[in-house]
Image (cartoon, rainbow, N blue to C red):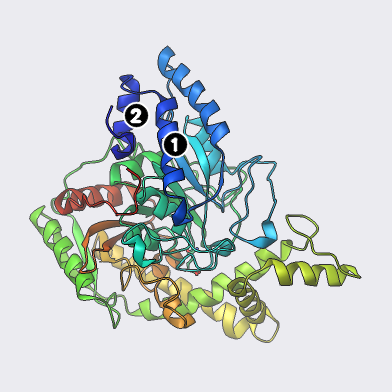
Amino acid sequence: MSNLLQFSISETLSLLEKKEFSTQELVETYINAIEKTKDLNMYLTTCFDQALEKAKISDQNYLNGNQRFLEGIPLGVKDMFCTKGIETTASSKILKKFIPTYESTVTQNLWKEGAINLGKLSCDEFAMGSSNETAAKGEVINPWNFEEKRTPGGSSGGSAAAVAAKAALAATGTDTGGSIRQPAAFCGVVGLKPTYGRCSRWGIVAFASSLDQAGPITRNVSDAALMLQVMSSYDPKDSTSSNKDVPNFYNDLGKSIKGIKIGIPEEYNSDGISSDILNAKDMTINFLKENGAEIIPVKLPLTKYSLPVYYIVAPAEASSNLARYDGVRYGARIDGNSLDEMYENTRNLGFGDEVKRRIMIGTYVLSSGYYDAYYLKAQKVRRLIKNEFTEIFKQVDYLVTPTTPTTAFKLGSTQDLLTMYLNDVFTVPASLAGIPGISLPIKLDKNKLPVGIQILGKDFDEQGLLNVAKVIESCASFKDTPNGAAS
Ligand code: GLN
């Protein structure tokens, strides 16, 4: 059989079922691909022996006709998901040698359905960042024009890069303010942030608990549907997980979008947005029109407050979540002459600069005297942003926006923090509102870098998002592969 890396999840499943190749061969091919793409710095830990063992079980299941939903599908896992017996560091020095004794619910759901773990993928430290440059073990290199050393985006940079570079058939990501959608856009793959509560957060290293959501990063929209179906579940161990039924996202794909209303928010148009991105947006609008959707310009005036609100709420929650890393319970410990000194040494050497900055901002906005002025105020504005989306979704079914203001920038080129934070200007609003969003690639820009478009929808309407995305995907027919991909 020709190159096994070229197939999507659904194609791979049907070829495995037809015994065109074995899971063993498939996993070996991916292991090889990971070795070939080592220079991109995507995997922090690999678990090849375990993967090959699991492949044997999958082959047996195919032989007996007992195959499960994702039997034998080799995946990469963002290092924010706790994986039993496999080092989980959240790309931080402070979690070095932390080997969880438990498995996150989302990854457990995947393994239960026969998917196979290839290893843990790099990300920004504790998922804080937009470029993968805060990762303790150094940044991931985007497989597109890899010789130019561009960012894969962040924080799920390793996941998006690995899927694009064919070093995983799909991957898990987490999105707090854009960390699935922005790297997916930068790497030319599909990234879906589900509605808050669709996937359990149990066993995922917490960054900002009211915003964190797990989701899939895949090569196409159908694969996102397959992955989401398995990743989603009600989980009594996460009180914010939803007990809504999980639809059969994959089977119900492909519905016509005739007559649906698509809003185009005029505010998603920041200064400095590249003409290629605007052009991708226009192309998308035309695809939608050709398929019978109605295009309606809309206004979301509170959009401009999203970033300031996010950069209060997210650090506040982070400062409280990260208090648990004290050198006693998890990972690394740097001794001192007293208990306090041990805490200080561990946290000082264990956390990187961006994480420390967020802990300080978060502690400040939560401190007495400032709580009302910052944190409480931000929470109130967050509610207004949510209400604005609720109102707009009475007029339109979906919103279409660019995913990012620029395509992948060069690593090391963004020195100033504000510019870095501005990367998430189009993704953060949906995170604050808890609504689902998907990014998919439309075209390449003049530098031959992928351009992503984002679709946002109502709470728990991932099915609709996937349907709209599927229509856009078939019109855009984005088929390019990065030069840094394994072959
Ligand atoms: N880039 C944003 C941040 O730095 C979002 C990160 C995320 O979604 N995890 O916080």
Instruction: Identify residue type, mark 2.
Output: Leu
Q: At label 1, which amino acid type do we have?
A: Pro
Total labels: the figure holds 2
Q: Is residue 196 visible?
A: no
Q: Residue at x 50, y 40 (%)?
A: 118
Classify 306 as above or below 132: below
| Residue to which mark 1 is pinned | 74
Q: Quadrant of residue 147?
A: bottom left
Q: Residue at x 58, y 82 (%)?
A: 374
- Report crowding for label 2: few under 14, some 14 to 19, many 20 or more residues within 10 A (C-alpha): some
Of the image marks 1 and 2, the number of the one nearer the N terminus = 2
Real-space Cα distance between discs 1 and 2? 11 Å
Q: Can you give x and y, in whole percent of width and height, for residue 186 in the image? A: 34, 62
- Residue 281 vs residue 221: left or right? left
Residue at 17% from the left image edge and 48% from the top image edge? 474
- Residue located farthest toward the left when viewing the structure as drawn: 290
Query: What secondary structure is found at the residue carrying circle 1?
Result: strand
Q: Indicate the secondary structure of the residue bearing disc 2.
A: helix
Q: Nearer the viewer, residue 300 or 118?
A: 118
Q: Which numbered disc covers residue 13?
A: 2
Q: Can residue 8 be seen by looking at this rendering?
A: yes
1 or 2: mark nearer the eye: 1
In percent of width and height, residue 438 lies at 33, 56
In depth, the one of 328 and 412 nearer the eye is 412
Indicate the position of residue 185 as horizontal and vertical percent values: 33, 61
Question: Which image quadrant: the C terminus?
Answer: top left
Look at the picture and state if 257 lies above or below 18. below
Q: Position of residue 44 (x, y in %)?
A: 56, 51
Residue lying at 48% horizontally and 53% vertically, measured from the top left: 42
- Which residue is more in the foreground, 379 or 169? 169
